[in-house]
Image (cartoon, coloured by chain):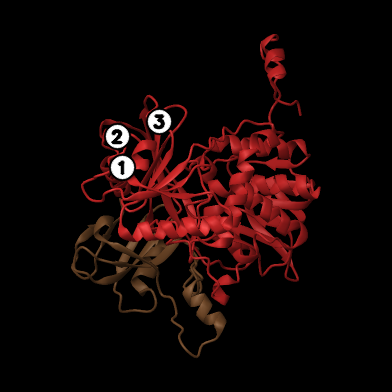
Chain colours: A red, B brown
Amino acid sequence: MKRYSVFAVAREALRYHTGWERAWRSPEPKRHYDVVIVGAGGHGLATAYYLGKNFGITNVAIIEKGWLGGGNTGRNTTIIRSNYLQDPSAAIYEKARSLYETMSQDLNYNVMFSPRGVIMLAQTEHEIRGYKRTAHANQQQGVQTEWITPERVKEIVPIINLHGPRYPVLGGLWQERGGTARHDAVAWGYARACSDMGMDIIQKCEVTGVRTENGRTVGVDTTKGPIDCDKIGMIVAGNASVLSEMAGFRLPMESVALQAMVSEPIKPCMDVVVMANTVHGYMSQSDKGEMVIGGGTDGFNNYTQRGSFHHIEETVRALVETFPMVSRLKMLRQWGGIVDVTGDRSPIISKTPVQNCFINCGWGTGGFKSIPGSGWAMAELMATGHSPLTEEFSINRFKEGKFIDESVAAGVAH
Amino acid sequence: MLILECPYCGVKAEETELAAGGEAHLKRYGPGSSDDEFHDYLFMRENPKGVHFERWRHANGCGKWFHAARCTMTLEVFGTYTAQTSVPTQEIMDKIAAKRPGWTWREFADGKK
């Protein structure tokens, strides 16, 4: 792999940019791999990357039924934060956030991580108490967040309306080192690094069956033929239930549509991420100037990658209340993705009833921010059978009643 | 926009008028059942890509619960039926079988009738 650098740009400038090579290879699948990762989204690619980087396992195939990063990795609102209440969540999300800080250097690929700061607005008494509690918990966990007053919120976000028609802004939970990153670049950067380590990224190849012998997995059937493997990692977000059914077990999981939209591009007006969870909308401004807006999930099972119309209205209404200036903006485009939601709104990173078959799913509405941490932990789990970061996220926690209840901490009516 | 006909008041209600109630025909387990049964009842879900039986409430209407059969891949609604049943009615099974030969969903799967 030729490294990207200022010298490379200069060199290519002198020869009409004819020397750039493809960022990753697209080989045909081999007959056997040590590890097969199903799903070439951010989480799957990150898992493969850390398997290679941290554990030297490079005989890996990453199988993707669509195109690389074309699922939720390319559909989220790119927000990165780690201000979670529960210890296991804070640990893995903070791991992810800290890995984002040096990701561009690690991957030699500019993921445009922008630690611009994230504010979660408190708009009810209940939320004030909730966020103060989270701020205290974060202090114990070593996650840098603080409770800020409405005046400070206004200072950070001049376009905000503190005295909205329904809910006043009573303060906020401020994570200065949170922010955004270029979501596609995260997938592309990992893919390039994986390919460079000799891993095969196989796109447009759907897994049609999971082969097991005596309770352990031996391979997968795909639209490009059968592939044998010693270990399999299922990292397919909204389609986790479909894949687990192929392997013969069920998940405590439901798939629903979550949608987002962007406005027409405008001049820079807001240099932080603002989440208003009571009225339910969140917004940041992309480098292109579009206001990136996220909304709520539908209440019913859905695999269509498109959400309900009325959620667009609800989300926009919430944001017009909070930021009156957006009322004149035109919507540029709107899209949906299928998120996998568990009973306690926390992910599952776990061994499964099938031996040598691992699953990483259930990130629900918060998958992008966790990509590097999730990959790091999943790789450790797959390579060594144990990871301190994933211990609490076992599939068995529902049976044991050891929930990691983030539905309150996230403050979102999922 | 999802539109379901309430089998009680006959109103063709769109989704803002309705509240989704999740997977239908779960077998209830309570005290005295095994941990596995209780766990499966509380948390495990079919979450199929295709035919799905589910519960809905006509929340901003007559307020009654009912059942619906729907395809989660196309949002096609096969029909709605009474809440007073613990298995899908024969009528709805026939409707689904006509449109989705070979469909599967738990023990109600096509061909297992």
Name the subunit of mark 2: A
- Residue of label 1: A319
Regarding mark 2 in the picture, which secondary structure is present there?
Answer: helix
Q: Amino acid at mark 2?
A: Val
Q: Do the numbered discs 3 and 2 sit on residues whose CB atoms are within 8 Å?
A: no
Residues tagged by mark 2 and mark 1 found on one chain of the structure: yes
Depicted A350 relative to depicted A195: above or below: below
Q: CA distance from mark 2 to mark 1?
A: 7 Å
- Identify residue for label 3: A290
Give the SS element for disc 1: helix
Q: Looking at the rendered structure, which numbered label has been put on residue A326?
A: 2
Q: Chain of mark 3?
A: A
Amino acid at pointer 3? Glu
Report, in whole angstroms, how far the alpha carbon at label 3 lies from the one at label 1: 14 Å
Q: Secondary structure at mark 3?
A: strand
User: Horizontal placement of A170 versus A193: left or right?
Assistant: left
Could you tell me the amino acid type at mark 1? Leu
Do callouts 2 and 1 mark residues in contact (Cβ within 8 Å)? yes
